[in-house]
Image (cartoon, grey):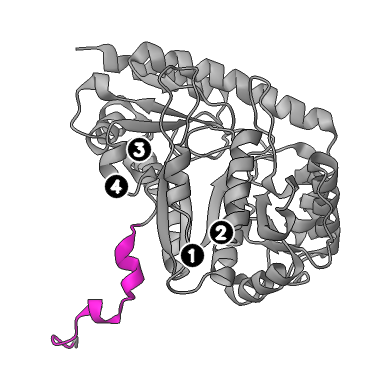
Amino acid sequence: MADAGVESKHFLSDKVEHFTESVIREMTRQAILYGAVNLAQGFPDFPAPAEIKRAAQDAVAADVNQYAITWGAKNLRQAIARQMKEWQGIPVDPETQITVCCGSTEAMISTLLAVCNRGDEVVIFEPFYENYGPDAVLSGAKPMFVKLRPPLSADGEWTFDEQELRAAFHSHTKAIILNTPNNPTGKVFTRTELELIRDLCVEFNVLAITDEIYEHILYDGTQHISIAGLDGMQERTVTINGLSKSYSVTGWRVGWAVGPPEITNAIRKVHDFLTVGAPAPLQEAGAAALALPGSYYQNLAKGYCARRDRLVPALTGAGFHCFRPRGAYYVMTDISSFGFANDLEFTKHLVKEIGVAAVPGSSFYNDPRDGAQQVRFAFCKRDETLDEAARRLQRLRTP
């Protein structure tokens, strides 16, 4: 019999009062419930490359089914080191600088838990991928938000105010989280912007934690630059990446953190007691994935560019004001022309009555009011999926 004098809240951590469950994942559940086209969660609905699926099958058949080395299978760590040297010119020791985790999500929280103390502050650009704020809170730090402002035109760039960013740095600042290419905006940070961030990190002795999971998904001649490759940053950067987006295997949960040896040692300690290790056969498949030729990545970007250019006109035609992304596979939109009170009402109407699931923009902001007239769509889908979504979205034009 339950004790009426016991309140469940008594047993809860204060930390969980500061955030909700993932809104993105909730919108996928809503899409399933209402039979909607899911343009909310960023997972492809098309097959992963046959070569890496075959590599995973071969690894399982070869009985690579027990624990790998806690911080990552040697083959994968060596492949990651080769990749960073080849693509960004950054030398990495696979024995002392790489920690393979259960996805880039775990790599991020392991890093923050490894470096943050209570009272530290972490700078985060907003709109931000929804995990970053809760990750900072769970690590005991206080998130400090700096706004990315939407472009004035559809082809413009998201920008930040240099003085606002500088004001966020002071003696309590431990780290800045940088996501480029950016989810949800599609912004790709320029060398000039990265050098400004570098100068602030050096001046205030701040660690850069950079999420580069979309590094190969770029458009319009845009270039991805790893901040770890800038002068003065290799010893104060943790670079996070993974297999999910570049190889269309979001369910494999294989990611990694690359940093200086002392910080890597701390990340490995946290990672060990969080998850022990990532799936062993999928790590071997990851090594095969990272050996794919350069043409694979060119075709990847080309394919996503075509999807972007398929969805954006459909959204515009349905009445959305779109902010054209330069990277990643999302498009942020302004919904003010539809006359809804806020993004939550709009996305509820969209999934139930129109049959398309999107993510309310408020979930990407510290103050929900800042995103109350924005909605994010994912275009990592088959042409027929995007076309069906476009057909349904035309219902928004029907009185």
Q: Nearer the viewer, residue 56 or 25?
A: 25
CA–CA distance between discs 2 and 3?
Answer: 32 Å
Considering only order in the chain, which callout, 4 or 1, is on the residue closer to the N terminus? 1
Type of the residue with mark 4: Asp
Q: Is residue 135 above or below residue 31?
A: below
Left or right of 48: which side holds 4?
A: left
Q: Does 118 sit left or right of 397 as displayed?
A: right
Instruction: Give yes or no for residue 171 being in the magenta stretch.
Output: no
Dot 2 amino acid type: Phe
Of the image marks 4 and 3, the number of the one nearer the N terminus: 3
| Marks 2 and 3, the one that precedes in the sequence | 2
Q: Nearer the viewer, mark 2 or mark 4?
A: 2
Mark 1 residue element? loop
Q: Which amino acid, by three-letter code, is at mark 1?
A: Ser
Q: Residue at x 63, y 55 (%)?
A: 202
Write down the residue under mark 2: 204
**Quarter of the image with the C terminus in it:** top left
Q: Disc 2 vs disc 3: which is toward the camera? A: 2
Nearest the eye: 228 or 98: 228
